[in-house]
Image: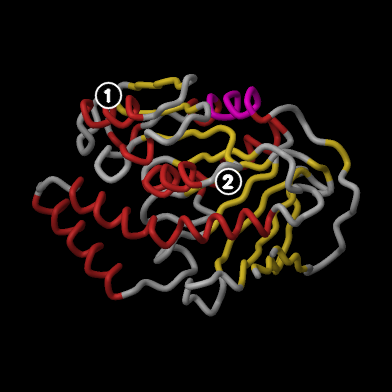
Amino acid sequence: MNTLRFTAETVADCVLERDFTVDGIAGNGDDAGIPGVLWSPDPGTYRAPLVLMGHGGGNHKKHPAMAGRARRLVDGCGFHVAVIDAPGHGDRPRTAHDEREIAVMRRAMATGEPVGPVVVRYNAHLAEHAVPEWRATLDALQGLPEIGTGGPVGWFGLNMGTAIGVPFVAAEPRITAAVFGQHWPEALAEQARRITVPVEFAMQWDDEHIPRSSALELFDAFASREKTLHANAGRHKELPRFEADSAVRFFARHLGARGTAASAGRAPGVSAVTAG
């Protein structure tokens, strides 16, 4: 039984931001629960599609990239948007395994060695834990009256958000459209072949870490009849900001229009929702 508890909320520029934790995830081992944030159109009582976002490696649920993309989706489409901290990131403690892998990555970057094999291995380890956490979080979020169980759900995740998102979307039939990008095919191509929902995929043509052939191999692996490749000039960290606007248009096409008033209002203050 997974319980979603709202712990704080703020409103700015007609966007409601609610911090939450999800407790009771079987086998998780995190006694503090999974911390997350849900952005919604204020006052947060409108039934609307949900977009789940996975953050990048070394970042967290409220990283400026996450907050900026969430506001675009709330302002532009009226969607609800949720992010949770990945294992070992944000408000979650690092394990000894996390520390070892991070140290290896830093050494590779400092010496100019290929970082891909380390990132692929570490991200695959994180995904093993994060995928069941995301499925439990989705269960709990769909217990909210403003989201519910019948509406469309999207996934938006680049870099590590792709490493976690590809196995998550492959295993989760509730996802109806996904935006991925900027990752290697190793450990992901097999799951990508099981994904048939519409996909938008972003890559950097001059990526110093991910060869063009690797990015194209992952894109090619998706079994989706509708998939679009966005290739931009530039290095790994130079993905154009307008790709976020493209993702908003993609989700607007595939998840639908703005929502309607939900059957139940939002209780003031801290609240809890339990999902079976």
Q: Position of residue 209 (x, y in %)?
A: 21, 39
Query: Which residue is tagged 1?
Result: 205
Q: Magenta residues, as a range?
A: 246-254
Q: Position of residue 230 (x, y in %)?
A: 40, 21
The type of residue carrying mark 1 is Trp
Residue 250 in magenta stretch:
yes
Answer above or below: position of 264 versus 104. Answer: above
Q: Quadrant of the C terminus?
A: bottom right
Q: Residue at x 52, y 61 (%)?
A: 133
Q: Earlier in the sequence, mark 1 or mark 2?
A: 2
Asked where in the image residue 81 lies, by quadrant, the reply is top right
Q: Position of residue 146 (x, y in %)?
A: 80, 48
Residue 227 in magenta stretch:
no
Asked where in the image residue 210 lies, by quadrant, the reply is top left
Answer above or below: position of 189 versus 229. Answer: below
Coloring basis for residues: secondary structure
Q: Main secondary structure of the magenta part?
A: helix
Q: Position of residue 179 (x, y in %)?
A: 48, 33
Q: Residue at x 85, y 57 (%)?
A: 266
Determine whether label 1 and label 2 are within 8 Å by CB: no
Answer above or below: position of 129 versus 172. Answer: below
Q: Quadrant of the N terminus?
A: bottom right
The type of residue carrying mark 2 is Leu
Q: Nearer the viewer, residue 259 or 76?
A: 259
Q: Residue at x 39, y 55 (%)?
A: 127
Q: Label 1: few (<14), some or many (≥20) within 10 Å?
A: some
Q: Label 2: few (<14), some or many (≥20) within 10 Å?
A: many
Query: Which residue is tagged 2?
Result: 52
Distance between the alpha carbons at the discs numbered 1 and 2 = 27 Å
